[in-house]
Image (cartoon, rainbow, N blue to C red):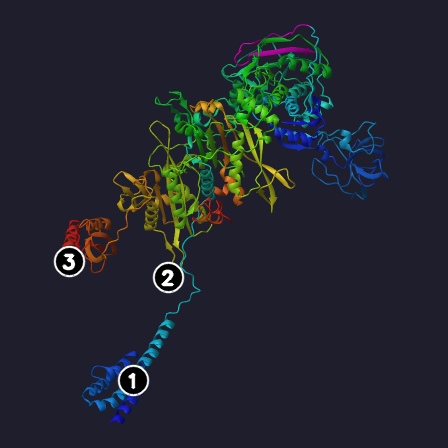
Amino acid sequence: MKFSLEWLAEFLETDASAEEIAAALNRIGHEVEGVDDPARKLEGFRVASVLTAAPHPDADKLQVLTVDTGEGEPLTVVCGAPNARAGMKGVLGLPGAVVPANGMELRKSAIRGVESNGMMCSVRELELGDEHDGIIELPEDAPVGQSFADYHDASPVFDVAITPNRPDCMGVYGIARDLAAAGIGTLKPIAVPDIAPQGSCPVEIRTDDPAGCPAFYGRAVRGIANGSSPQWIQRRLLAAGQRPISAVVDITNYVMLAFGRPAHAYDLARLSGPVVARRAKEDETVEALNEKTYTLDPTMTVIADDAGVHDIAGIMGGEHSSVTAGTSDVLLEIAYFDPERIGVTGRRLGLATDARTRFERGVDPAFLDDGLAILTSLIQSICGGEASAVVRAGEPPVAPQLLTFDPALTKRLGGIDIAEGEQQRILEALGFAVDADWQVTVPPRRHDIEGPADLVEEVVRIHGLDKVQSVPLPRREGVALPTASPLQKIERMLRRSAAARGLNEAVTWSFLPTDEAEHFSDGAPLWVLDNPISEDMKAMRPSLIPGLLGAAKRNADRGFASSRLFEIGRRYFRVQNGASDEKPTLGIVLAGNRSARGWADGKAKGFDAFDAKAEAMALLEAAGAPVANLMVMGEAGEQFHPGQSATLRLGPKTILARFGALHPRTLKAFDMDGPVVAVEIFLDAIPARKGTAVFARAAYAPPALQAITRDFAFLVPVDLAAGELVKAVRGADKKAIVDAQVFDVFAGQGVPEGRKSVAVEVTLQPGDKSFTDDEIKAISDRIVANAAKQNAELRA
Amino acid sequence: MSQEHEHKVAETLDALGRAGTIEAVEAIRIEALGKQGWLSGLMKTLGKMSPEERQVEAPRIQALRTQVADALAERKAVLEEAALTAQLVGERLDLTLPAPEAPKGSVHPVSQVMDELAEIFADLGFSVATGPEIEDDWHNFTALNMAETHPARAMHDTFYFPDQDSVTVPASSSEAVGEKRRMLLRTHTSPVQIRSLVEQGAPIRIIAPGRVYRSDSDATHTPMFHQVEGLVIDRDIHLGHLKWTLETFLKAFFERDDIVLRLRPSYFPFTEPSVEVDVGFAVENGRRVLGGSGDDDGHGWMELLGSGMVNRRVIEFAGLDPDEWQGFAWGLGVDRLAMLKYGMDDLRAFFDGDNRWLAHYGFSAFDQPTLSAGVGAKA
């Protein structure tokens, strides 16, 4: 909300400068977003008198003026305004001054061959209003030579962010009250004029919706002249960012901005029958003052007469009964509307107005009569007219709230010692009544005060939050325990391990375009936003791969031959009862070249499924998964290449990861060139580390004897998985065989059709004694026999 | 006879001088010193001599043998050296050619900063808590003292899921059973306050970093960003503790002792009193650098975070007695902290996955924040 210092000074007696006031506002919780000082903008502009005016020798529409600036020789100024004439007084901008409206710096220049030493200014050029028909004409007594800023009494304008809990400060008077409590001057009492009513109100006023409109006060003022409002009102409204419209409208706006009290004026001639606050009817419409037509429903409160709706209550008036220049009789409305009702109606209609903001947050329910009196008095003094008696329909909720307050709470919550007397002074300055037993009566305008903690806030904020001193949190006794959960520790291990393995961590959006999400959802129901910011950010991701693929594609489009990206984040699913099931996941996408063209062979090498497997295995190991027990099983899902992807499982159901090359269809959907390989590790599936809670490792007992190795080459069916053969080999003697590694796979020349050769190096670890030749032979025979069960024969 | 021996030695030495290979030297050795060699044979003749004769002949023959053996060893060494030199010349590599390069990985600044936060707060006794990002409106708003019609709700630019996604509070819950709750993307990390209090009770000290969402997108806002929530509930905790905690954290995070905070009254429905925290900064090389009082020459105040004493209602909503338990909470933008500390200036780039950006602003895997080495990683 914006207001000028001179407006504030009407309510607050103070010597404080604009800077001091701004600092105080910040201190007490009204954040100053800016202080606009028009005096600074008007630097270089001064009151000047036109001595002579002659036609420009070379231009029809220009005149050459000589202008007295109060010092030195008169200046020659070229001017195009039709109203420029000898003997008038106006505002001259001197060279160096910057025109507020357009930021142009004035300089000495020749205009069509005549030297001009400045510019006579219009209202609009100085941002004092919209008028631009000619230059400003000042009264005859304006002192020539005075700076225009001083003459104009230009007043600094504060732009203050009022928090939603303080509607009482959405008027200048409320701000003055807070400032006075904080020691910036003395609050002046509100002068409520006595109105001598003439006759009763000619209109019946009712509230048929006491829930939505508990109180509706009104009166007529007849025989007014609705011209433009006086300069002092216009100036304040302009400072507040409001455009002056007509005297009556300006006065209602003025009362709203000065006291936080919205009001409405109807053209009495346009009303017929009783004026009633009631619920709108289904599909009832009203053309509002913004010239838009709104369709209403019965949840909304309106002000209507026999003919129809004239006001969307508390939000915006209707066009039909709006006051105009020709209006001579008005009906004034001051009402109290239910804040929730106003909020719901405003949201439903998508209509934000100054009145709504105030009613929605809560206006002062005890300020109806005073507000109406101030409004009436201003209209009468500016527009004339006779005021009727006041009609009061319903009653505003003014029952005072009583709180029992313990001033010691200020120290307990606020951590600051404030003397009881000072606490009482602060509360009273804010309009609270405090009795000897610390029973505090809350003024009805303070809807935000719910309990003692709110009183602490009032006391501390006015006393000064900056006086709160730091107090160390007590250190917890005892041994420092880990503060990260097991899952968090796994995430950290994975993140650092992946980065150490050469992968770059990315953070991608949690939401995806719906088609990308569906491509990876495997039919699971997706979370799809009702109000996405764009179609590209609509469905919560069921996989980390699409987001990383998108990033890899952008990198490829930028000319990067390869991307190695990973992300640790959540996939979003549902549990049975509809709540969210967010699965912690690590995703990897390796796209493009694994190695660039090198001098050794001149060829770049693309990523393949084994690169994905390498990352999956290494990172699972880093995460503490029992990798030795992992089974490579099945395919990774329809997004992956059916022959080049797999899952890593502990048992048939516990899937720890999936990996492999992506399906050509997936690449096509993402408009990418292959091969692209990917991994997803499902962190919630990694079993918790077993083991007792001790640090000491098992005793170190290296084998006394050296292990020996033996090679076996088998001919196996081409479709036999090497892993199956190795498993069979290892099963031959689980004690002696400590390792078995495939060291050659070959098919083609010398190998029969339908077979392939797989060579395995078996490591045998003797126990206390070396193996005898017979023992080794027995193990070898068992290896060959086990392999034979997999249809593998030892090569000759 | 002796003349003949000397002559033979001279011949052998001559042959050695001409021997060009190790093999040729070996042949000469065998001819002279092998089992059947003439010098070996000569040695054997000593046994048959009379002692007097032997006294004369032994030193002479021994000297001849030494002369030949030394010459053999010397020639062999020369040839071996030459062979090695030749081999090495053949093995010469052009080492200006590039070596195979291991790819350089990186940790995202958001993760790095979250790890830093966890480290700093661990020292203050805070554990790290998490909660769902797809929340219900009770946890995100109602329990934080923002009733359905609360104006503050409208200020949150909330992403909602359709009505049919609403959940019904199960019968097992202590909360309003059967109530329908609208699902949404959490607009702040504050619902973790409620969940942690309900699960763990008091006293509690947690930070809750994570993703949050607002329907907002421009140069400084992205629809997804990161916050870290802080919560301390205990007995006798007040605003002074809040100030100390934030001061201590910010000093540790920016590794500067001259961090100055300014507390301003503000409004959040879930705290009372509510406090906006500003921090003093100066502009150095066109960049805001935290440190010093905002009132100092050339300094200013920057809004950094919202905080306050947890509202009694929130403590009640979490099932605790607000007359017994009180404390403070705060919420802070993690991305913004990262930008302030590490100098990024465009939030949108955080979520693009651009290789160049990740390499430029990312951190080495080994930049693990620790108290002993400094939680920050210098450029």
Q: Is residue A204 magenta?
A: yes
Judge the density around disc 1: few (<14), some (14-19), many (≥20) Cα neighbours within 10 Å: many
Q: Position of residue B296 (x, y in %)?
A: 64, 39
Q: Is residue B260 magenta?
A: no
Whether pointer 1 and pointer 2 mark residues with C-beta atoms closer than 8 Å, the reply is no
User: In the image, is residue A39 above or below residue A794?
Assistant: above
In space, the residues marked 3 and 2 are separated at their CA atoms by: 47 Å
- Residue to which mark 2 is pinned: A601
In space, the residues marked 3 and 1 are separated at their CA atoms by: 50 Å
Magenta segment range?
A199-222
Q: Residue at x 38, y 72 (%)?
A: B89
Q: Residue at x 45, y 51 (%)?
A: A560
Q: Position of residue B139 (x, y in %)?
A: 43, 27
- Pick the residue in front: A499 or A537: A499
The secondary structure type at the circle numbered 2 is loop
| Amino acid found under the numbered disc labelled 1 | Val
Q: Position of residue B359 (x, y in %)?
A: 47, 49
- Residue to which mark 1 is pinned: B68
Judge the density around disc 3: few (<14), some (14-19), many (≥20) Cα neighbours within 10 Å: few
- Residue to which mark 3 is pinned: A772
The secondary structure type at the circle numbered 3 is loop
- The outermost residue toward the top is A199
- Pick the residue in front: A270 or A452: A452
Residue B237 seen in the current view: yes
Q: Viewer-nearest of labels 3 and 1?
A: 1
N-term mark: 3 or 2:
2
Q: For this view, does A569 lie left or right of residue A180?
A: left
Whether pointer 3 and pointer 2 mark residues with C-beta atoms closer than 8 Å, the reply is no
| Amino acid found under the numbered disc labelled 3 | Thr
Q: Quadrant of the N terminus of chain A?
A: top right
Which of the labelled discs sits on residue A701, or is there none? none
- In the picture, residue B278 is in which quadrant? top right
